[in-house]
Image: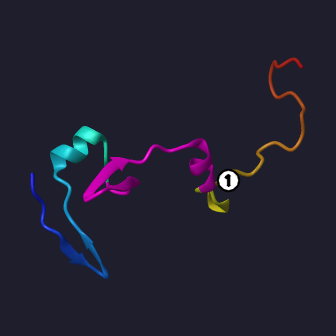
Amino acid sequence: MNAIALKWGNSLGFRLPAFVAKKLGITAGSILSLDLMGNTIMISKHKETLESLLDRIDNTMLHKEQLTDDEPRGHEAW
Protein backbone atom coordinates (compact mmCIF):
# COMPACT_ATOMS: atom_id res chain seq x y z
CA MET A 1 0.00 0.00 0.00
CA ASN A 2 1.30 3.48 -0.85
CA ALA A 3 0.52 6.89 0.60
CA ILE A 4 1.50 10.38 -0.53
CA ALA A 5 3.24 12.74 1.90
CA LEU A 6 1.44 16.09 2.00
CA LYS A 7 2.57 19.42 3.44
CA TRP A 8 0.89 20.19 6.78
CA GLY A 9 2.22 23.44 8.25
CA ASN A 10 5.96 22.93 8.72
CA SER A 11 5.49 19.15 8.79
CA LEU A 12 4.43 16.37 6.48
CA GLY A 13 1.44 14.08 6.91
CA PHE A 14 -0.44 11.33 5.15
CA ARG A 15 -3.92 9.82 5.31
CA LEU A 16 -4.42 6.55 7.12
CA PRO A 17 -6.88 4.39 5.16
CA ALA A 18 -10.17 3.82 7.01
CA PHE A 19 -9.87 0.03 6.98
CA VAL A 20 -6.43 0.21 8.64
CA ALA A 21 -7.67 2.65 11.30
CA LYS A 22 -10.69 0.46 11.99
CA LYS A 23 -8.61 -2.71 12.27
CA LEU A 24 -6.23 -1.03 14.76
CA GLY A 25 -8.96 0.80 16.68
CA ILE A 26 -7.57 4.22 15.77
CA THR A 27 -10.00 7.13 15.78
CA ALA A 28 -9.61 10.90 15.43
CA GLY A 29 -7.57 12.07 18.41
CA SER A 30 -5.93 8.69 19.07
CA ILE A 31 -2.35 8.93 20.25
CA LEU A 32 0.09 7.11 17.98
CA SER A 33 3.63 5.97 18.68
CA LEU A 34 6.25 6.47 15.97
CA ASP A 35 9.48 4.49 15.93
CA LEU A 36 12.31 4.55 13.42
CA MET A 37 13.99 1.28 12.51
CA GLY A 38 16.65 2.09 9.94
CA ASN A 39 14.73 3.57 6.99
CA THR A 40 11.39 2.22 8.23
CA ILE A 41 8.76 4.13 10.19
CA MET A 42 6.80 1.93 12.59
CA ILE A 43 3.42 3.41 13.57
CA SER A 44 1.34 1.84 16.33
CA LYS A 45 -1.53 2.83 18.57
CA HIS A 46 -0.16 4.21 21.83
CA LYS A 47 -1.02 2.07 24.83
CA GLU A 48 -2.31 4.31 27.61
CA THR A 49 -0.94 3.87 31.09
CA LEU A 50 -2.76 4.86 34.25
CA GLU A 51 -0.17 7.58 34.82
CA SER A 52 -0.66 9.10 31.35
CA LEU A 53 -4.45 9.09 31.80
CA LEU A 54 -4.18 10.75 35.22
CA ASP A 55 -1.81 13.39 33.79
CA ARG A 56 -4.59 14.53 31.43
CA ILE A 57 -6.99 15.35 34.28
CA ASP A 58 -7.45 19.07 34.93
CA ASN A 59 -9.56 21.07 37.39
CA THR A 60 -12.55 21.21 35.03
CA MET A 61 -12.89 17.42 35.30
CA LEU A 62 -12.92 17.22 39.10
CA HIS A 63 -16.19 16.79 41.00
CA LYS A 64 -16.95 18.77 44.12
CA GLU A 65 -17.95 17.01 47.33
CA GLN A 66 -21.69 16.39 47.38
CA LEU A 67 -21.91 15.50 51.07
CA THR A 68 -19.98 17.30 53.76
CA ASP A 69 -20.81 15.02 56.69
CA ASP A 70 -20.90 11.29 57.36
CA GLU A 71 -24.49 11.13 58.59
CA PRO A 72 -26.49 8.14 57.28
CA ARG A 73 -29.01 9.04 54.58
CA GLY A 74 -30.96 5.79 54.37
CA HIS A 75 -30.60 2.39 55.99
CA GLU A 76 -26.80 2.37 56.02
CA ALA A 77 -25.00 1.02 59.03
CA TRP A 78 -21.37 1.84 59.72
The image quarter containing residue 25 is: top left
47 relative to 19 in the view: left or right: right
Q: Does 67 sit above or below residue 40?
A: above
Is residue 58 in the magenta section?
no
Magenta-drawn segment: 28-55
The number of discs equals 1
Residue at the image position 18 percent from the left and 73 percent from the top? 6
Q: Does 74 sit above or below residue 60?
A: above
Q: Picture coordinates of residue 40 (x, y %)? A: 25, 55
The image quarter containing residue 55 is: bottom right
Which residue type carries mark 1? Answer: Leu
Q: Which secondary structure lies at badge 1?
A: loop
Residue at the image position 19 percent from the left and 61 percent from the top? 15
66 relative to 11 in the view: left or right: right
66 relative to 42 in the view: left or right: right
Residue at the image position 20 percent from the left and 55 percent from the top? 16
Q: Nearer the viewer, residue 69 or 13?
A: 13
Is residue 47 in the magenta section?
yes
User: Which residue is identified by label 1?
Assistant: 62
In the rendered image, the residue lying farthest to the front is 38
